[in-house]
Image (cartoon, helix red, strand yellow):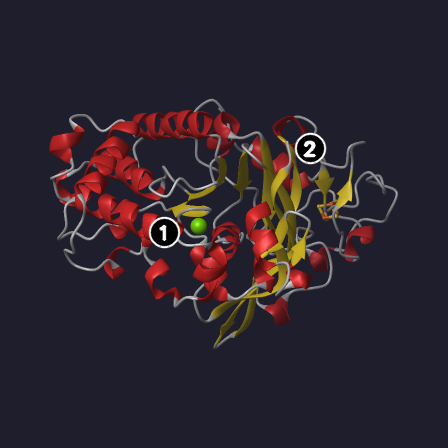
Amino acid sequence: SEDVLRVEGLSTRFFTGEGQVNAVEDVSFRVREGEVFGIVGESGSGKSVTGLSLVDLVESPGEVTSGKLWYRDAELAADLQQEFPAAVDGDYVDLRGVPEAVRTSLRGTSFSMIFQDPESSFNPSLTVGEQIAEAVEVQQRASSRPRSTRARTDSSEYSLGSLILSFALPSRRYISEESRERAVELLEMVGIPDPVERADEYPHEYSGGMLQRAMIAQALAGEPDVLVADEPTTALDVTIQAQVLDLLSDLQKETGMTVLIITHNLGVIARMCDRVGVMYAGEIVERGSLADVFRDNVHPYTAGLLGSVPDLESVGGSLDPVPGNVPSLLDHEMADRCYFADRCPKAMEACLERPHPRAVDDDGDHLVNCVLGEVSYGDSPPLPDEYFDDDG
Ligand code: SF4
Ligand code: MG
């Protein structure tokens, strides 16, 4: 199937007191319509910031500083063609090349995001049903107007919606009976028992797993094309994790939506994903199909990660990473060489030139940032000790 999203050269920086942090560094990947794409990495690898960058939720002092986010939407492309020709290419719109109001108008209906911590996504003083019904109404108001008009309207109304900014939700406003019914349907769809009764309960009356399901219901209120899920099950115990993952899988198949899962858990990737990108130090260092990455991997970091997990069938299996630390992402401390060199068992002098993505299969879908394959281990002198991480 076709790509729904083409990310090209995405970089996101944080401008902190200690200097510029390159959280996401020149990242490119494509997500196909209707697939489950996984981004896996250790904490601090930049995977969450990548997700936030896609949905335009990076907050100050962070900023997406470069790159293109091509999103396929023929109707939107036609709407914007005249005014923003440089941001339109066929059926694709570069979301970074259009006003913020356009991006905001896509929230909930085109993109939706769920997080690890459902408590932060609900207002404790409103019932779960009210909040989901509110998300339904915001999405209906948003999609009842032509998008080109929406794009020019004040964006504040659309910053609500199922993008789950809970405390921005207005206190009780009139909610139609239809929206309440739809909220109950959504709760039923995500497997909440007795949804009519549970809709009238408050978030604290839900268990963690149930609240996670309710958050998914809220995120689906606008029938998004792409659901970004950042560590969607990490806070749950293992049995419940598996149930919520199965639910996401079933919903994906039923609706045909595209799901982008961000996780440190390779078991989650193995269970859910069609294609996967492995992140390290702000870069995607290897990406391809599940088989490319799990079986035919080339990058020593990927191999190290997989070797560190005893049982991929278990979604509870934790990542016991490769020895050493993810390098500082402070710009002035980042060397212009392979970022993995100080932890890599195969580091060579050839690795002192920074590797860029290179196809290692015929169809060009399996890409690695590593010299191996071009240079065989042993053909280039080993790296002197001074290059290695002291802790590694
Ligand atoms: Fe290891 Fe060199 Fe490949 Fe980097 S480029 S991962 S140091 S072999
Ligand atoms: Mg994270």
Say which of 313 and 190 sits in front: 190
Q: Secondary structure at mark 2?
A: loop
Give residue 248's position: percent from left, percent from top.
40, 31
Q: Is residue 283 above or below residue 319?
A: below
Give residue 72's position: percent from left, percent from top.
59, 46
Q: Residue at 85% x, 49% y: name it.
A: 381
Q: Which mark is residue 163?
A: 1
Q: Residue at 46% x, 53% y: name it.
A: 106
Q: Are marks 2 and 1 in contact (CB under 8 Å)?
A: no
Q: Is residue 278 left or right of residue 47?
A: right
Q: Which mark is residue 297?
A: 2
Q: Residue at 17% x, 37% y: name it.
A: 206
Give residue 347's position: percent from left, percent from top.
74, 47
Q: Which mark is residue 326?
A: none
Q: Nearer the viewer, mark 2 or mark 1?
A: 1
Say which of 240 and 75 sits in front: 75
Amino acid type shown at disc 2: Asn
Inter-mark Cα distance, 2 to 1: 35 Å
Amino acid type shown at disc 1: Leu
Q: Is residue 116 above or below residue 167?
A: above
Say which of 80 and 308 sits in front: 80
- Count neighbours of disc 1 (C-alpha within 10 A) and say few if under 14, some if 14 to 19, many if 20 or more: many
Q: Is residue 365 visible?
A: yes
Give the quarter of the image for residue 235. Answer: top left
Q: Is residue 330 above or below residue 301?
A: below
Q: Is residue 56 visible?
A: no
